[in-house]
């Protein structure tokens, strides 16, 4: 469907994107994830045509659109600010693209009302100014405006970032449902890893203009290809020298020459170790109570390990309490240290 | 390059070339060359023997006769900085910071200078305080020995301008004080500071940047003062330039060179001050760091004596501001007889000062009565007055619109070329007139275009006959460019860049994006700039005085003429009444414009739709009530 081949983008001397290669499949929900300044929005803007790459090609449905003008690309976009035209009503905002395409008035009306119904905007809301709508409603207008012209692809640039936390979760679900209903190929840009994990079919993790990994949410989370990815996605423990050597002594297959990581939920407190698992002595330093779960900070062999336990009401450990931390060496993700780093 | 790209380039290229040619013509033809001509004319003097003597006027200046005007202007400017700041800060604090009873009424009074200024205000003050003024006459009945000419010269100019020039304080300082985070005041109070201490240590320091700008602006206003010194008789720079410009070498030594020198001196002062100001502004301001600002609450003055003094002070200022306004409004509806007797006569109400004509009978020196037909006439019935109003209306509207169009086109380009050379050059070219006093531009136009040697205007003498109107429009436009540019540029900043991207993504080309998306967003600001420009130009005096001629008699000049002796030989009988009516008319026009700009124009689409809904509901209610009544009937 969409193929980015060896895309390079430069702003003056600065190279914003280095040899980006992505292949998005038809109907897929594909997310560009990364910290700010990593090149994810630049990649999106290259697809929509706001930025022309120095080299490489953008191919959509086997057609090279690298040098096709923005307005002829037929790619919808939902902006971070929504970019709704403040001087037009909701109706006129949605109808804008159709009017430019010189669609007949009656047809415009039919299509605007149809898409409005689909995104749950009432007739009354259509006659309002965009400033009279709430954040969530504005987002629906932005989506309707992007979809009404029937684009092949829709791009969303952090569309949830200026909403409050509760609305974000609610709209996240709505977004996913709408995408399923419309079946449209979606490219989604976000720096929020939780958003990426819950929404996406596949994720491309960006860092400093490179793609570190492309994979399903499970792949990038549990089988992070690089140290950056494993650090950026979710919380994680880096195992110190003490823990690593204790594991090696116990006969586990751990390489002390690498950086070893383990996710918080893969550690357990005071459970009987299964085969191949190890139990290490530790003392609870502190805990954070989240309701759904409890996060413990446990001092183990000269380092603090973070452990998450489901708040099932059975086990709650107090500060200073001696506990056993159970670790499974198969859960460890190990990475070669960088050229100028020393292994722990 | 492929042929498609080439095709796209061509019209673009032509438009660009036309744009460059236009702005180059505007800048060189109507800013730089005329002013350079003025500069060089200083050194183009001849001595008594007719030989060229480049430094004659400089020696003349150093000999001392001209220094008086410069010193007078400086003296006025320095005094004004003190008095305007004292009054300006007072009125803002009294209405916004301290809890004074009747603050809303007081504020309306203090804001009256926003709806009438310049010649309308000065003639208004004269109507009260001049030797034949209403108040002076009333006072002389009680104090026969008082000097009837007390209101003239330096003191009168200082007094008038002190109260006339506080509009900027009311606009900018008021905003600054309302922008203060009240939590900072509460924090200071919490730590034990009394209201005056809070004012001195917390509130005033945050207003220093605004006060600095206001001080510089006031200083420049004082230096470049025109209407008050001319009408009240004070020998400062500007009136002298206008006098010299109209003088001939037969009467005095090189008047043109002297006028040029004075205007260049004025320009130097202005440039220095503005450089200081912009250097200071570039240093950055105190920005409020708080994200959750609390609204300022008014401070009660707990000390009863201080409280009473503050109230008395507030109301004295109110009386000073309001008396001319009230008197002018009242007397604009009084007959010439009442005005001439300087007394309010309750049985002498009339509309004649506004509309209609009446004949006037007067006694000649031979003891006979003569009738002058239609000699008493209203503002809109008097040919000369109506002519001035019409001329000013057309020229101001043209210039205001022209300035807006130029600036919108320029801003669109500047924002496209953000930070790049050509955009910056254009921006500075349009800001150039800001550095020059209005009088320099006008004087330069008057002298430079008063010849048939300027090839780029088709060798036409633009100061001659009707042509002067074109010159006035150009002067109006050029002097309004910097202000318009600053305002419109600010509104361009409010266009979210993503909007442009969104429009293009939806298929709109750049012209369509501009017309359908960007223009509607900036349109309220552009209309506001148009209205404010028009408002300022409609009663503009400084430029009008420089260009004054048979074909260029603007409204301000007509108003000034109304101050001339009235009733002689039965002419001009109700000139004073018409003058009052004029000021009332100006106040109405300005008030309406300000209401449109800040009241209606500031509403966004949502607020307009809501207002429409409310109107519709009211109408429906009315209709329902009406039909209900009908049914019961």
Image (tube, rainbow, N blue to C red):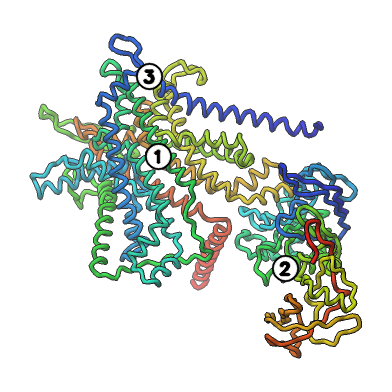
* Marks 1 & 3, CB-CB < 8 Å contact: no
- Mark nearer the N terminus (1 vs 3): 3
Query: Element under label 2?
Result: helix
Indicate the position of residue B191 as horizontal and vertical percent values.
39, 71
Question: Which residue occupies the foreground of this view, B223 or A122?
Answer: B223
Which one is in front in this view, the residue at disc 2 or the one at disc 3?
3
Q: Position of residue B566 (x, y in %)?
A: 21, 35
Chain letter of disc 2 in the image: A
Question: What subunit carries mark 1?
Answer: B
Residue that badge 3 annotates: B43
| Marks 2/1 same chain | no
How far across and down, in percent of the image, does residue B186 sit? 42, 69
Circle 3 — which element?
loop
Image quadrant in which you'd find residue B479:
top left
Quarter where residue A129 is shown:
bottom right
Could you tell me how far apart the alpha carbons at marks 2 and 3 are, in whole angstroms?
75 Å
Judge whether residue A161 can be spotted in this image.
yes
State which chain disc 3 sits on: B
Is residue B456 found left or right of B570 in the rendered image? Answer: right
Mark 2 lies on residue:
A171
Alpha carbon separation for disc pair 1 and 3: 25 Å
Residue B67 pos. (x, y %) = 27, 29
Q: Residue furthest bottom?
A: A314
């Amino acid at each position: 469907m969409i193929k980015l081949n060896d895309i390079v983008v430069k702003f003056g001397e600065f190279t914003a994107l280095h040899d980006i290669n992505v292949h998005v499949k038809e109907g897929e929900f594909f997310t560009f994830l990364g910290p700010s300044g990593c090149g994810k929005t630049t990649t999106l803007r290259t697809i929509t045509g706001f930025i022309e790459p120095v080299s490489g090609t953008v191919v959509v449905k086997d057609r090279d659109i690298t040098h096709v003008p923005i307005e002829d690309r037929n790619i919808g976009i939902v902006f971070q600010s929504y970019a709704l035209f403040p001087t037009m009503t909701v109706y006129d905002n949605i109808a804008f693209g159709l009017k430019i395409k010189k669609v007949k008035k009656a047809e415009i009306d039919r299509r605007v009302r149809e898409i409005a119904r689909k995104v749950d905007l009432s007739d009354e809301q259509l006659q309002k100014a965009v400033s009279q709508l709430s954040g969530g409603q504005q987002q629906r207008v932005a989506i309707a405006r992007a979809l009404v012209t029937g684009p092949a692809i829709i791009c969303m640039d952090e569309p949830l970032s200026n909403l409050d936390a509760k609305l974000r979760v609610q709209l996240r679900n709505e977004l996913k449902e709408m995408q399923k209903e419309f079946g449209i190929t979606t490219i989604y840009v976000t720096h929020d890893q939780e958003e990426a994990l819950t929404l996406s079919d596949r994720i491309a993790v960006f860092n400093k203009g490179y793609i570190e990994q492309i994979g399903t949410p499970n792949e990038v989370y549990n089988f992070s290809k690089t140290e950056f990815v494993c650090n950026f996605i979710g919380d994680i423990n880096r195992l110190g020298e003490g823990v690593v050597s204790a594991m090696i002594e116990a006969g586990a297959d751990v390489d002390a020459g690498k950086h070893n990581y383990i996710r918080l939920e893969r550690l357990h407190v005071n459970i009987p170790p299964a085969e191949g698992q190890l139990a290490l002595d530790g003392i609870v330093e502190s805990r954070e109570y989240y309701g759904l779960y409890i996060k413990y900070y446990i001092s183990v062999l000269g380092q603090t390990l973070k452990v998450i336990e489901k708040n099932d009401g059975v086990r709650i450990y107090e500060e200073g309490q001696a506990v056993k931390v159970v670790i499974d060496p198969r859960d460890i993700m190990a990475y070669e240290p960088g050229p100028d780093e020393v292994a722990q | 390059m492929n042929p498609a790209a080439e095709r796209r380039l061509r019209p673009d290229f032509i438009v660009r070339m036309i744009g460059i040619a236009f702005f180059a013509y505007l800048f060189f033809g109507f800013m730089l060359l005329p002013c350079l001509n003025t500069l060089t004319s200083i050194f183009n003097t001849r001595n008594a023997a007719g030989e060229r003597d480049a430094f004659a006027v400089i020696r003349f200046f150093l000999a001392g006769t001209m220094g008086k005007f410069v010193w007078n202007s400086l003296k006025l400017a320095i005094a004004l900085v003190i008095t305007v700041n004292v009054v300006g800060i007072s009125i803002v604090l009294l209405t916004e910071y301290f809890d004074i009873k009747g603050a809303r009424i007081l504020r309306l009074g203090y804001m009256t200078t926003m709806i009438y200024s310049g010649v309308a205000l000065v003639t208004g003050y004269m109507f009260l305080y001049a030797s034949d003024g209403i108040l002076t006459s009333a006072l002389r009945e009680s104090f026969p020995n008082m000097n009837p000419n007390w209101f003239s010269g330096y003191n009168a100019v200082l007094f008038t301008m002190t109260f006339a020039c506080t509009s900027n304080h009311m606009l900018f300082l008021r905003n600054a004080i309302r922008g203060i985070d009240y939590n900072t005041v509460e924090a200071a109070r919490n730590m034990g500071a009394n209201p005056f201490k809070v004012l001195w240590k917390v509130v005033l320091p945050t207003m220093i940047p605004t006060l600095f700008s206001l001080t510089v602006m006031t200083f420049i206003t004082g230096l470049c003062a025109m209407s008050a010194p001319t009408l009240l008789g004070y020998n400062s720079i500007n009136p002298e330039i206008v006098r010299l410009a109209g003088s001939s070498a037969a009467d005095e030594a090189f008047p043109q060179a002297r006028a040029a020198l004075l205007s260049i001196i004025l320009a130097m002062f202005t440039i220095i001050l503005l450089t200081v100001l912009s250097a200071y502004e570039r240093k950055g301001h105190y920005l409020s760091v708080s994200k959750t600002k609390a609204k300022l609450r008014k401070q009660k003055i707990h000390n009863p004596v201080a409280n009473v003094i503050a109230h008395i002070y507030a109301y004295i200022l109110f009386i000073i501001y309001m008396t001319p306004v009230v008197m002018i409004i009242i007397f604009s509806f009084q007959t010439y007889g009442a005005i001439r007797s300087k007394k309010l006569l309750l049985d002498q109400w009339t509309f004649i000062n506004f509309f209609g004509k009446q004949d006037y009978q007067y006694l000649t020196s031979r003891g006979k009565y003569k009738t002058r037909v239609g000699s008493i006439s209203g503002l809109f019935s008097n040919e000369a007055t109506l002519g001035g109003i019409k001329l000013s209306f057309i020229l101001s509207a043209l210039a205001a619109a022209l300035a807006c169009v130029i600036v919108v086109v320029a801003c669109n380009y500047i924002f496209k070329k953000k930070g790049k050379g050509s955009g910056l050059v254009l921006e500075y070219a349009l800001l150039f007139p800001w550095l020059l006093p209005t009088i320099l531009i006008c004087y330069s136009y008057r002298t430079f275009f008063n010849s048939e040697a300027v090839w780029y205007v088709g060798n036409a003498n633009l100061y001659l006959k009707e042509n002067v109107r074109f010159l006035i429009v150009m002067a109006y436009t050029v002097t309004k460019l910097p202000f318009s540019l600053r305002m419109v540029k600010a509104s361009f900043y409010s266009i979210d860049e993503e909007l442009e991207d969104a429009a293009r993504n939806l298929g709109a080309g750049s012209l369509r994006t501009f017309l359908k998306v960007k223009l509607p967003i900036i349109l309220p600001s552009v209309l506001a700039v148009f209205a404010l420009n028009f408002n300022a130009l409609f009663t503009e005096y400084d430029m009008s005085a420089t260009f004054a001629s048979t074909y260029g008699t603007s409204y301000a000049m007509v108003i000034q003429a109304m101050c001339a002796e009235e009733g002689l030989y039965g002419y001009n009988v109700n000139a004073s009444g018409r003058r009052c009516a004029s000021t009332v008319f100006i106040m109405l026009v300005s008030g309406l414009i300000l209401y449109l700009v800040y009241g209606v124009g500031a509403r966004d689409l949502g607020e307009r739709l809501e207002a429409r809904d409310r109107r519709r509901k009211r109408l429906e209610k009315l209709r329902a009530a009406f039909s209900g009544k009908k049914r019961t009937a």
